[in-house]
Image (spheres, helix red, strand yellow):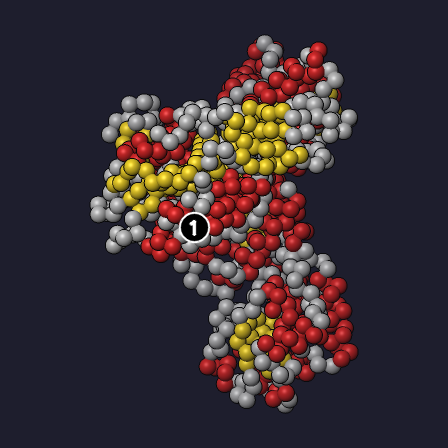
Amino acid sequence: MTITNSISSKTLERINKLIDELPEIYQPIYLQGELIREGVRQNDWERLEVIKKLIKPGQTVLDIGSNVGFFTIELAKIFPDNVFVSVEKQVSYAKLQKELLQVEKLTNVILINSEVTVEWLNAASQACTYFDVTLLLSVLHHMKDASEFLQELSKISKSLIIELPNPNESKVCGKEILREQLTVEKLKLYKPIFEKLDYESTTHCDADLKREFYYADSPNYHRESCFPYIGYPVQPRNYRLQNLNGKNVLYKEDLNETINLIPGVLLYDLHQIGSILYPNFKIISSQIEKEFKFLDDISNSEEAKIADIRPWNILFTSEGLKFIDCKYTSDLDYDLIYDRERDLKIISNYLEAILPSGELAKIVIDAVFFQLYRTGIARVWNSLLEVWAKNGFAKHFILIDRGGTAPKIPGIQYYFVPPYDYNRTELDRAILQEVCDEVEADIFISSYYTTPVSTPSVFIAYDMIPEVLDVNLDVPMWREKHYAIDHATAYISISENTACDLAKFFPGIPRECITVAHCGVEAVFSPASPAEVNSFKIKYGISKPYFICVGCRPGHKNPILFFRAFAQLATKHGFEIVCTGRGVVLEEEMRNYTAGTVVHNLQLSDEELSLSYSGAVALVYPSQYEGFGLPVLEALSCGCPVITCPNASIPEVAGEAALYVNDDDVEGLADALCEVQKPKVRNSLIAAGFEQAKKFSWSKMAKTVSSALIEATLVSLNLKEINLIIFPDWTQPEDSIFLELERVVRAIATHPNKSQITLLVETSKISEEDANLALSSVAMNLLMQEDLDVSDGPELALIGLLSEIQRSALIPRLHGRIVLDNENREAIAQAQAENITLLELDSLKI
C-alpha cells in the first residue's frame, strides 16, 4: 500500500504496531484518506452521513467511547471550526487515536484517555465543561447505570446523538438495559425533543443485528456555570451559559452583558477527569504568548488605562488557547490591575501543572511491579508516588501504567503501555524506548528491572537475595535484574547492607556510587487503643495472648525457627499464633510444632495489621536475609516488641530496639520468647522502638530518591571533581567565537589537573550539532598547530536549557564560571549563574 502524502515508513510501521496491539478492530482505520486496516463493522461511512447532518459549524462535540476515533477524526476534518473532545477508556485504542491525530495534524481535537462514569460527568459539570452535541455510539447499552448517566449527561450537553441496537435481536448485549432504561418513552425524559431517526441498518459485525439512531435536543439549552479565577483569591461569579439566536453565549449577571463564546471546551483541574494525551504545554506555549500580546495591546490603549485587564478563564478552542474574559468588573480588588509578568507566570504555572510540558526534566518511571505483585515493593512505590504528588515532584516524571494496574493518584501523568511479558523482553525494551523518545526522557527508572534500549537508567536494589542465597540466576526474572544492573548509569539501594551486597557481587560498581534511601512507614502503623485491639481479637476469634509471625512460608524468612522454639515453651498452651502474609497456610512440618495451639492464618489489611501488631506479645521475625525489613519497622511503630536475627539490613532498621538471636539458635529464640514477656523488658523495647521508628519516613526516602534521579539526569555532562562553565555569545562572528573557545580550551588543557576537569559549554543559542562542530574544530586546531591533545583532558560537555531542579543540582557542583570577553548575559541570568565564583582566564587557578 502506498500513502500518497508524505508519511514516512517509520510512521506507518509505528501505526501498524499500534494496530496490532488492539483487542479488536471495530472501526476502519484511515491514514490521510488511505485505508490502513478494515474494521469488523462494514458501514461506518453510512453512519457518518447520519451524524454529520445533525452537527452544525462552530459546535463543541463530545464523542464518548470513541474507539480509534474514526468519527471524531472524520468530523474534525469536515468541521474545522468545531472542537471535538474524544474520550476513550481503552489504552490501546487511545494510543492509536493519538498517533492518527498527530499524523492528520488535527488541532481541533482534545483526546482524553479516561473511563467516563457518572462521577466523571459530575467533575466535568463542576469544571464548567459544556458540549453542544454528545455522541453515544455503541456505548450506552453496556452501562448498568444508563439512566443515571443520561440524566447527568443531559445537564452538560445540549444535544445527544445515540445509536442503540434493537433489544429483540438474539445476539445483542444489554437487552435488559435496552428494555428497562433506554426505551423511547424514557429517553424523552432527558430532553424535550427526543426522536427516533429514519435510519435502520445492520451496523455491527453481525449482519443480522439491527441498530437505530436517536436524536435529542434542547432548543432553549442553558445552565448556570461557575467559572473559576486562575491564581487569584477572588470568589467565582455565576455566569449563565445559554443559546441565543443560535449562538452559545455566556451571560454575566453583574454587568448585564453577554460574551460570544469561541467554540471550545473549558477543562479545569484536568487530572480529576482523565489523563490528557493531547495537546501538550509545548504546543500551546506560543498561543499563550499570543494572548498576552493581545492583552498588552489592550492595556496600552487609551480606553483601557482605568480597566482591570486580567487573564482568567482559560478556554481551549478550535483556534487554540484563549482567555474568554478580560474586562473590568466592579467585584475585583483595585490592586488586581493587569500585570504581565505576574499574570504570565500564574497562567504558565497552572498550565504546566495540568498539561505535559516540554520544558521540564523528563524522568520516566515504569510502574511494572504493580502488574506483577502486590507485596512490599508495591507499598514502597505507592508511598513514593503519593509523596511526590503532594510535594510537586510529580510534574517532573511520566509514570508508565501497565494495563491499568498502577495506582491512580491525582497530579501524576500516566502513559499506558501493554502488560509486561518475560517472553517478550526485547519488544518491551523497544516499547519503553519509544516512550522515552516521545517525552524526550533524560533518565529512566523501573520499579522492577525493566529497561529501555538506550536511555540512561537508574537501578534500584531492594535486596540481593538470589545472589546471597545462591539460587538459580538463569530464570528470566533474575536475568532481567542483571541486565538492568549492567544497563544502569546510577544506583539506589533501600539499605546500607543491600548497597554493600550490590557492590560485592558487581565489583564494577563502587560502593560510593550507590545512594542509600531507607524505606519509611505508613501513618496507619501506630499504637492502637485497648478497645480497638479487643475488637480485632473478637473479630478473628483470638482469645489468648499471641505472637505474630509475618511471612510463614518456607524460605529465607526462616519461620521454622520460630515454631521449633515455640514448641519448647512450657507455657505454649497459654498462647495463640497469628500468621499473616501471602500464602499463610502452614506447611505440615510447622503444624507439627503447634499441636494443641490455635494458629490464625490471616490475610489482613494495613489497618488490621496495625491492630495485630498493637495487640501482640511480640513480632517474631527470624529472617536470614532482608533487603530492608518493613515488618520490623511497622511493628516498632505500633509499640510491638520485636524478636529477630542480626542478619543483613535488619540491625539498620531495628537498631537497639529488638531482641536478637542467631537464625539457627532454637534455644536462644525460646529464651527470647520468655524474656519478652517480662514487663521491664517489654517497656524498654517499646520505648526504644518508638525512638527508632522516628528515624524513618517516606518523605525522607522520597527526597533522597528524587535527588538521586535529578543527579542522574546530569549524567550526560560527565561531571568530575572540578567542573567549570562558560557562556559564549554564539551571535558573534565565527572567527571571534573560535578564538575565544580556543583560549579557554588551551588554558584548561595545559592545567596540571586537566584530567579532573569538565568544561561545560552553554548552547541555548546554537544547535548541538553546530556547537559540537565548533569544539571539534578547536580541538583539531590545537592538535595540528600546537601538538596539544585534549583527549586526555579536560572533558568537554555541551549544556542546553536546564529545568529548575536540574539547575539546583548542578550549581553546587560548579567550581567556577570562566569569564569571557563576549558572554550570553541572557543565558547567565536564565541559568541563575550570576553568583557562581568568577575565574579570569589569564590567571586560572583551580
**Position of 477 relative to 275 (above/below):** below
Task: Please state, as top left, top right, bottom left or bottom right, where the N terminus lies in the image.
Answer: top left
Task: Locate residue 826 relative to residue 52 in the image: left or right.
Answer: right
Task: Give the percent coordinates (x, y) of residue 209.
Answer: 25, 47
Q: Residue at x 41, y 49 (%)?
A: 186
**Position of 277 relative to 295 (above/below):** below
- Taking depth in this image into account, of 595 and 604 the one nearest to the observer is 604
> Disc 1 designates what residue?
146
Task: Give the percent coordinates (x, y) of residue 592.
Answer: 50, 85
Q: Secondary structure at mark 1?
A: helix
Q: Residue at x 74, y 17 (%)?
A: 306
Question: Could one spot residue 57 in this view of the protein?
Answer: yes
Task: Give the percent coordinates (x, y) of residue 727.
Answer: 65, 21
Task: Locate residue 405 relative to residue 291 in the image: left or right.
Answer: left
**Position of 680 relative to 226 (above/below):** below
Task: Give the percent coordinates (x, y) of residue 726.
Answer: 65, 23
The amino acid on which the numbered mark 1 sits, given as a three-letter code, is Ala
Picture quadrant of residue 78: top left
Q: Residue at x 41, y 46 (%)?
A: 187
Task: Locate residue 20 relative to residue 605 in the image: left or right.
Answer: left
Question: Could one spot residue 723 in this view of the protein?
Answer: no
Extreme residue toward the left, this view: 207
